[in-house]
Image (spheres, rainbow, N blue to C red):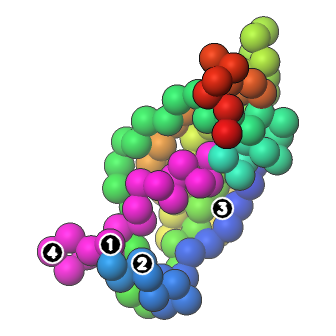
Amino acid sequence: QTVLTGRILPGAHPWLADHAIGGTVLLPGTAFLDLALHAGAETGCPVVEELTLQAPLLLPADTAVYLQVIVGAPDATGRRTVTVHSSSAPASGTEPQVQHATGTLTATPAHPGDAG
């Protein structure tokens, strides 16, 4: 498995404030797709075959949010699972994490015309 990590500082990305509901800033759903695409490109499976959003990612105004994108080992067909998690502290295995998205990555599109 491959684990990619990062953090989001909402103040460093003012455009995130445009994605607020009731005064609460949320990471846009397309950002999860972008994270999955990047993880797929890093692991040789640049096609997101499926991505299911499970929970919104709330972004506090002045606190970093830490991300983990986990890509599983290839299965018999070459597909890999991908999950996106967040926490309020860097990943150490002890802090609670929220799973925001799950999906499947593949090296090639299901239909040749679907690429690109």
Measured Cα–Cα span from mark 2 to mark 4: 14 Å
Rendered residue at 27%/74% (across/down): 20
Rendered residue at 61%/35% (across/down): 48
Disc 4 target residue: 22
Q: Amino acid at mark 2?
A: Leu
Rendered residue at 52%/29% (across/down): 50
Q: Amino acid at mark 1?
A: His
Secondary structure at badge 1 equals loop
Observer-side mark, 2 or 4, equals: 2
Disc 1 target residue: 19
Residue at the limit of the structure toward the top, as seen here: 76
Q: How far across and how far down the image is residue 2, in percent?
A: 79, 43
Observer-side mark, 3 or 2, equals: 2
The circle on residue 91 is: 3
Pick whichever of labels 3 and 2 is earlier in the sequence. 2
- Residue nearer the viewer, 95 or 54: 54
Q: Amino acid at mark 4?
A: Gly
Observer-side mark, 3 or 1, equals: 1
Q: Is residue 75 left or right of residue 93?
A: right
Measured Cα–Cα span from mark 3 to mark 2: 23 Å
User: Which residues are drawn in magenta?
Assistant: 19-36
- Quarter of the image containing the N terminus? top right
Residue at the limit of the structure toward the front, as seen here: 113
Measured Cα–Cα span from mark 1 to mark 4: 10 Å
Q: Is residue 63 something that shows in the picture? A: no
Pick whichever of labels 2 and 4 is earlier in the sequence. 2
Q: Is residue 77 something that shows in the picture? A: yes
Residue 27 belongs to the span the image colors magenta: yes
1 and 4 marks in contact (CB < 8 Å): no
Disc 2 target residue: 16
